[in-house]
Image (spheres, rainbow, N blue to C red):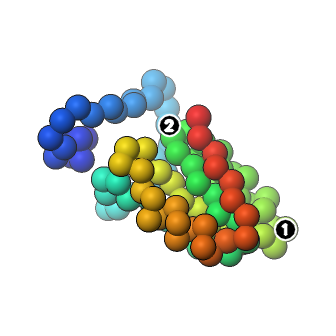
């Protein structure tokens, strides 16, 4: 909510009902307009957001056990879209996957 309070204008916040696991430590707060790099690989660039990030983390274990390295980005914000992070991932990887709800 700290990021939402710092924005001058309308903000959309999605809150989950029920239990949702913490994916990121409290010591690593989100940065507005910046994607979080969850892993650094060169075979596949994986971009996820929302609940799909948890699912993507589960699937990553299968890929990695098969020798596929993944550059995984989690999008905390869609607007502004972190184009620079996406371009960096696309330059490093051979293939791309986007997983969003």
Q: In the rendered view, would you say 74 is above or below 8? A: below
**Residue 24, x across and y down, in percent:** 44, 55
**Residue 68, x across and y down, in percent:** 78, 70
Q: Is residue 80 left or right of residue 89?
A: left
Tag in front: 1 or 2: 1
Q: Residue furthest right?
A: 66
Q: Residue at x 78, y 62 (%)?
A: 63
Q: Residue at x 67, y 71 (%)?
A: 93
Q: Is residue 48 left or right of residue 93?
A: left
Q: Residue at x 30, y 53 (%)?
A: 32
Specify whether residue 30 is in view. no
Q: Is residue 29 left or right of residue 62?
A: left
Earlier in the chain: of badge 1 and badge 2, it is 2
**Residue 84, x across and y down, in percent:** 44, 65
Specify whether residue 67 is in view. yes
Q: In the rendered view, would you say 95 is above or below 18? A: below
Q: Is residue 95 left or right of residue 16?
A: right
Q: In which quadrant of the rendered image does the C terminus lie?
A: top right
Mark 1 element type: loop
Q: Residue at x 73, y 53 (%)?
A: 59
- Reading the image, the residue beneath label 2 is 20
- Reading the image, the residue beneath label 1 is 66
Q: Quadrant of residue 16?
A: top left
**Residue 66, x across and y down, in percent:** 84, 68
């Amino acid at each position: 909510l700290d990021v939402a309070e710092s924005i001058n204008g309308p903000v959309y916040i999605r809150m989950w009902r029920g239990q949702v696991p913490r994916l990121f430590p409290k010591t690593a707060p989100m940065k507005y307009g910046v994607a979080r790099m969850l892993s650094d690989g060169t075979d596949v660039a994986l971009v996820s957001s929302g609940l799909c990030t948890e699912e993507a983390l589960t699937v990553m274990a299968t890929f990695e056990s098969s020798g596929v390295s993944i550059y995984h980005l989690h999008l905390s914000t869609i607007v502004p879209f972190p184009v620079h992070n996406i371009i960096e991932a696309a330059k490093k990887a051979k293939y791309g996957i986007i997983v969003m709800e």
